[in-house]
Image: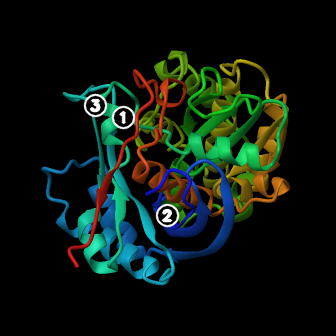
Amino acid sequence: MLKDQQVRVVGAMSGTSLDGVDAAEIVTDGHRIIEFKDSAFLPYTNAQQNVLRAALGKWAEDDIADASELVETVHAQVLSGFEKADLVGFHGQTLAHDPQGLLGAPRTHQTGDGAILAEVLGKPVVWDFRTADVQMGGEGAPLAPFYHFALAKKMDAKTPIAILNLGGVGNVTWIDPSLPHPDSDGALLAFDTGPANAPINDLMQTRLGQAYDKDGEIAAKGTVNQAIVDDFLNHSYFYRMPPKSLDRDAFVGLVAAVEALSDADAAATLTMACAASVARGMKSCPNPPDRIYVTGGGRKNPVLMAMLSEVCSALVVPIEDAGFDGDMLEAQAFAYLAVRVAKGLPTSAPGTTGVAAAVGGGTLSRPSI
């Protein structure tokens, strides 16, 4: 693709909250966001969620055929509706993430074969975004920061801001929009803040048979167990300097700690744990951001948003306050990154993943006909 060519591209994201597949189409030259196009969401059924949950923590050599086929089929279903897109960005479903090599060699695992998807859709597909970064010593996550930088430029921000994504795991991008490029020294600092919706969702599913705590209704009835939150904040992860990233199930001790609590108290405690980990993370930013723009499902939980406002010094607002769609930011990000991969541009840098140097990850697969 020509360096300055504008591309109509659709990106798809299936996050660690396991709620379904987001797909969003944008027009970009790999630097600027030119235009936002259509989007779509296809939820996983309960049975499909159970298949994916059973595969969490597994690697490519494990028996994950059912999960892989499911991811490919559901993505093909939702992406087939974007006939005008010239390119596809396919993240796949993260099942395991071990960039520190605690279980052996550093690696990350997103299931779903982009080459198969390219054949089904009849379009070029960029996928396997994280492996190259991990192989070069990076955390492989988060990868949305380069897109967040483009958003900051589009909103014409003049002073540092932060974009906080609250999906299954929380991650934040601190942005200095005065610098020219996302890989400029000091332009970005990004890292996972801690668990976000995943432990709350799992609690709701296990105890009440519901997918999530809608509007924070259960947590609103409970009392935070501050001792559990304080103990959670003593986890070694919070003493590591960013950039850093987490596996979805890195905080199983937190889930175990609330087992004896009532449904409401457990939900309130897990919700405060998310907010407290964000506040802890914000202390690592080079300068305090003027605003924290919240994206992902967590922004729809008024109890969580109130807790964030309570413990964070910056103004906390949903990303919609800046005119963007908080449901589709991650999908848009992988659309944007797909164009950068296709043009040979970097997709991560030392400030975003801790990688040794700016690197462009991703594999480009083209259909055979």
**Image quadrant where residue 271 sits:** top right
Going by the image, does 58 lie left or right of 260? Answer: left
Q: Which residue is mark 3?
A: 135
Q: Count residues near mark 2 (Cα–Cα under 10 Å), then give few for <14, some for 14-19, many for 20+.
A: many
What distance separates the C-alpha of mark 3 from that of mark 1? 5 Å
Residue 143, horizontal then vertical, whole percent: 49, 42
Residue at mark 1: 133
Is residue 190 in sight in this rendering?
yes
Residue type at mark 1 is: Asp
* Precedes in sequence: disc 2 or disc 1: 2
Distance between the alpha carbons at the discs numbered 3 and 2: 24 Å
In the rendered structure, the answer to whether residue 198 lies left or right of residue 363 reads right
- How far apart are the two marked residues, 2 and 1, measured between alpha carbons? 19 Å
Q: Position of residue 355 (x, y in %)?
A: 41, 25
Circles 3 and 2 in contact, beta carbons < 8 Å:
no
Q: Is residue 114 above or below residue 184?
A: below
Which of these two is toward me, 84 or 170?
84
Q: Residue at x 47, y 30 (%)?
A: 353
Q: With 24 as the anchor, is 252 left or right in this view?
A: left
Which label belongs to residue 312?
A: none
For the point 85% across and 32% down, the residue is 290
In the displayed structure image, the side of residue 51 where residue 342 appears, left or right: right
Res. 11 mark: 2
Find residue 31 and report its horizontal and vertical position in percent. Answer: 60, 47
Please tell me whether residue 283 is drawn above or below residue 132 in the rendered image.
above
Query: Is disc 3 in contact with disc 1, using a CB cutoff of under 8 Å?
Result: yes
Pointer 1 local density, CA inside 10 Å: few below 14, some 14–19, many at least 20:
many
Amino acid at pointer 2:
Gly
Total labels: the figure holds 3
- What x and y, as percent, mark residue 7? 53, 64
Q: Which amino acid is tagged 3? A: Gln
